[in-house]
């Protein structure tokens, strides 16, 4: 207790030091705990429900060639089980949603009246659906409420779903991602009793206490046998499978380790800065410490008291870091673009693991910045500091160069390099040449439904679909494409074991108007013509042509859409198109492909979904026009539906936004690290100047020019800056390998990024040395020597 009182009294005499130290440590701990909260949410996903380990969705499998069991009858068999406390269900589809002047397509979930009570979800605002809710009630997600409804009061707030108006009665928590969709409405009473009108039905159960997942699976197998006994065994046997509603844990990738590493580097720099400040503080108190030791205080007592001071600063920093983390996690979650969440970086949520990690980081920081300065400060010769004017001579050389500052500078360069690389990569991706005009280009994905397309009607249905969509006044041209082409090998007829094989090439069937709709020109040969599908015609892009036939004309050559050992037919090249990014529904939205092969498309009855490329007359369509397009597709395909109509490059734009978001994160890390390193450098140089003021006074008194004194101070700062820059350059080139997949078209040792990061570091570093150098240059020798 005496050590605590002494530490509080000592720190109260230096409020500026306490404020700077607490801010540095608190911000660094907040960055670390917030980053850990992101990783923890990925590895331990959770939903704000009651007893999540007892909640399961049930998939109802099974299909017969004839006399198939209806979906509702399967649900009734499931309800006959004895393993659950309560059971509900939900359905979902894309529907037109209107809120004020905003119109667009959204995923809408229809739920049974007991689903939210079954889940045990607490509303963020208002109330959620329950058995007493009216049929015109709806609840929305937090994001939808803020983005579409502008966060308005729920009193009198309405929206339209399809042709029906609903009253918004509640907002469910932002972390509640189940059952999905931004708008949730109740199923009609008839559907809740009989399942009528539901496209699909997904049961949700809360199992009884004491039932294990294995016991539930065994019981579901018994229930499935009832369907088998009544309807027989067909192509897909009847079965029920239960799966927890809790999201599957994400797998950590290189970018996640890079984020964690960046946050840890910031903490190391903060600890190094605090260690430097504590060392300077110990040197400034060396006369006081020597006097106490002369009066009988042991070295252990002095070290313990100094360590208690560090512990108080660590506690204050930990408290500040905790408060900042609680504030930052929801703010960061709301700022995350959806594409970042889909890539594994999810909304951070505070948990006990996050708080334990923050406490551990604070204790580790205490050891890093408190132990060594306490030992160094207590290891003082009692006689030396008590000699008159010794402060100006005994510590002069010690504080000219600080290895701690060198370490801070080098670690700051690592983070600056990462931010520079990500900025350059995001810029190159956003400015990359697409090979076609993106304005007014939409994509749609059409779900035809199993068994809807017969072999003799596939071509007629596709022709009718293209005709109906193309007849809309908003549409200039339309083309179809079949998904599932993927990325595979392409082999030419001149394959000799080493040449004539391209390993990574995307291809897929497209209709004869595809290249015209996208605006991709044919450079050699011709475009597709009707009947090319029967002649097995293909068009390759420049990349494929140059790789397979570097010394030949590509038009007229034969290729296999597979490797050399596959027994597949040959296709004839009829044209060479310009290289273009064609990341549609089946394309890679993050990296342009390494070559493309377009096959003449022949509709296949085995394909349950088609893609559409739609070129509109106006550069941008409002939500109503998109809804009209979707309705036209639905009219052309009775029993089918359009799952989405959206800009062709929406996935590409999401990828760009994801990269810019991560660029901002690393820029924040590097900016904070650079600030800490600048403070540390300024502190060391400034303290060194104060310790050498008598030397500077003597130099000026004997005739040394002021600029020579300035050069001495600048030299000391330059040594630390250049040493840190040299070491940091090697560390930066090694550490940037963790950014890997996020460096589109940028190498991790990019010289321009490294030079830019070094230039920023050198500029800020020398600026930090400027004020102490000017103070030394303007020293008045008469006043200084008189004060000694």
Image (tube, grey):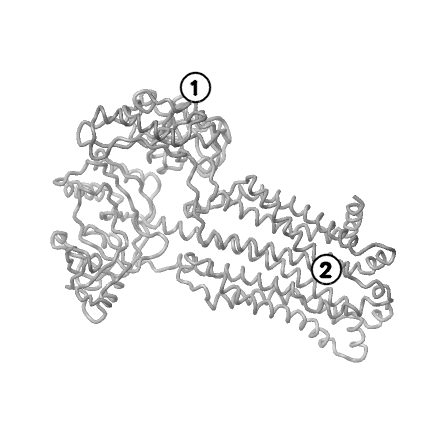
Question: Dot 2 corresponds to which residue?
Answer: 279
Q: Which of 622 and 26 is in front in this view?
A: 26
Q: In which quarter of the image is the C terminus?
A: bottom right
Q: Is residue 498 left or right of residue 412?
A: left
Tell me the quarter of the image containing the N terminus: top right
The residue at 24%/61% (across/down) is: 541
Residue at (60, 70) in percent of width and height: 723
Give above or below for 261 relative to 747.
above
Task: Using the image, tell me which numbered label, if any, was put on residue 229.
Answer: none
First in sequence: mark 1 vs mark 2: 1
Q: In this view, does 257 lie above or below 769?
A: above
Inspect this view and state whether residue 658 appears.
yes
Q: Is mark 1 on a helix, strand or loop?
A: loop
Q: Which residue sits at x=66%, y=50%?
A: 23
Q: Where is residue 275 in the image (x, y as percent from the top left)?
A: 68, 58
Q: Nearer the viewer, residue 95 or 263?
A: 263
Q: Which of 448 and 562 is in front in this view?
A: 562
Q: State the SS at label 2.
A: helix
Looking at the image, residue 702 lies above or below residue 41: below
Compared to residue 229, the image places residue 538 above or below, namely: below
> Could you tell me residue 403's position as x and y percent?
65, 65
Left or right of 226? Residue 206 is right
Task: Give the image location of residue 186, x and y in percent.
Answer: 38, 25
- Front in this rendered view, residue 604 or 740: 740
Mark 2 residue crowding within 10 angstroms, few (<14) / some (14–19) / many (20+): many
Tag 1 residue: 132
Residue 163, picture quadrant: top left
| Residue 161 visible to the viewer | no
């Amino acid at each position: 207790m005496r050590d605590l009182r002494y530490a509080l009294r000592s720190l109260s005499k230096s409020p500026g030091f306490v404020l700077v130290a607490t801010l540095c440590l608190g911000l660094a701990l907040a960055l670390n705990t917030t980053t850990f909260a992101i990783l923890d949410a990925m590895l331990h996903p959770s939903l704000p429900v009651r007893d999540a380990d007892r909640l399961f969705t049930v998939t109802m499998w099974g299909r017969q060639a004839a006399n198939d069991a209806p979906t509702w009858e399967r649900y009734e068999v499931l309800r006959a089980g004895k393993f659950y406390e309560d059971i509900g269900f939900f359905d979902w589809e894309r529907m037109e949603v209107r809120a004020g002047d905003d119109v667009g397509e959204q995923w809408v979930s229809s739920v049974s009246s007991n689903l939210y009570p079954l889940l045990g979800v607490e509303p963020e605002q208002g109330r959620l659906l329950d058995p007493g809710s009216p049929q015109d009630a709806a609840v929305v997600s937090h994001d939808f409420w803020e983005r579409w409804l502008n966060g308005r009061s729920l009193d009198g707030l309405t929206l339209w779903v399809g042709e029906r108006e609903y009253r918004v009665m509640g907002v469910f928590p932002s972390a509640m991602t189940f059952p999905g969709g931004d708008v949730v409405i109740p199923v009609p009473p008839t559907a809740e009793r009989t399942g009528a009108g539901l496209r699909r039905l997904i049961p949700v159960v809360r199992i009884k206490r004491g039932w294990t997942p294995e016991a539930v699976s065994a019981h579901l197998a018994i229930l499935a046998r009832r369907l088998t006994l009544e309807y027989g065994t067909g192509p897909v046997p009847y079965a029920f499978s239960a799966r927890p509603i809790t999201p599957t844990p994400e797998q950590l990738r290189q970018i996640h380790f890079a984020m964690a590493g960046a946050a840890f580097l910031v903490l190391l720099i903060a600890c190094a800065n605090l260690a430097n400040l504590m060392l300077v503080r110990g040197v400034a108190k060396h006369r006081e410490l020597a006097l106490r030791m002369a009066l009988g205080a042991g070295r252990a007592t002095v070290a313990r008291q100094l360590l208690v001071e560090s512990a108080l600063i660590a506690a204050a920093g930990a408290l500040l870091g905790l408060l900042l983390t609680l504030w930052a996690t929801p703010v960061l979650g709301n700022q995350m673009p959806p594409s970042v969440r889909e890539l594994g970086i999810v909304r951070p949520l505070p948990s006990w693991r996050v708080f334990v990690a923050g406490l551990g980081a604070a204790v580790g920081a205490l050891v890093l910045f408190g132990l060594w300065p306490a030992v160094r400060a207590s290891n003082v010769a009692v006689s030396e500091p008590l000699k008159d004017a010794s402060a100006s001579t005994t510590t002069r050389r010690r504080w000219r160069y600080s290895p701690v500052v060198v370490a801070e500078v080098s670690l700051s360069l690592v983070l600056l390099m990462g931010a520079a690389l990500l900025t350059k990569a995001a810029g190159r991706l956003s400015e990359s040449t697409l090979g076609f005009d993106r304005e007014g280009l939409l994509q749609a994905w059409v779900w035809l439904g199993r068994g809807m397309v017969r072999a003799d009607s596939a071509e007629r249905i596709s022709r009718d679909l293209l005709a109906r969509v193309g007849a809309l006044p908003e549409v200039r041209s339309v083309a179809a494409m079949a998904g599932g082409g993927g990325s595979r090998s392409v082999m030419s007829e001149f394959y000799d074991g080493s040449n004539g094989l391209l390993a990574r090439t995307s291809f897929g069937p497209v209709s004869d108007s595809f290249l015209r709709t996208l605006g991709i020109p044919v450079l050699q040969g011709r475009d597709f013509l009707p009947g090319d599908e029967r002649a097995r015609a293909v068009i390759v892009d420049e990349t494929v042509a140059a790789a397979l036939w570097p010394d030949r004309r590509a038009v007229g050559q034969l290729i296999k859409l597979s490797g050399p050992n596959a027994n597949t037919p040959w296709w004839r090249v009829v044209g060479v198109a310009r290289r273009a990014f064609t990341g549609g529904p089946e394309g890679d939205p993050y990296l342009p492909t390494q070559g493309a092969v377009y096959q003449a498309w022949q509709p296949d009855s085995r394909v349950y979904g088609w893609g559409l490329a739609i070129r509109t007359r106006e550069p941008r369509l409002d939500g109503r026009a998109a809804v009209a397009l979707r309705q036209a597709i639905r009219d052309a395909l009775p029993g089918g539906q359009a799952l989405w109509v959206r800009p062709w490059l929406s996935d590409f734009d999401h990828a760009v936004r994801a990269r810019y978001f991560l660029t901002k994160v690393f820029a924040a890390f590097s900016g904070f690290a650079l600030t800490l390193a600048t403070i540390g450098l300024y502190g060391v140089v400034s303290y060194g100047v104060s310790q050498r003021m008598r030397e500077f006074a003597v130099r000026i008194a004997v005739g040394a020019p002021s600029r020579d004194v300035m050069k001495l101070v600048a030299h000391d700062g330059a040594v630390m800056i250049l040493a840190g820059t040299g070491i940091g350059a090697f560390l930066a080139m090694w550490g940037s390998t963790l950014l890997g997949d996020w460096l589109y078209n940028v190498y991790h040792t990019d010289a321009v990024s490294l030079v830019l990061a070094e230039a920023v570091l050198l500029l800020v570093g020398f600026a930090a040395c400027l004020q102490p150098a000017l103070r030394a240059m303007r020293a008045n020798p008469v006043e200084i020597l008189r004060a000694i």
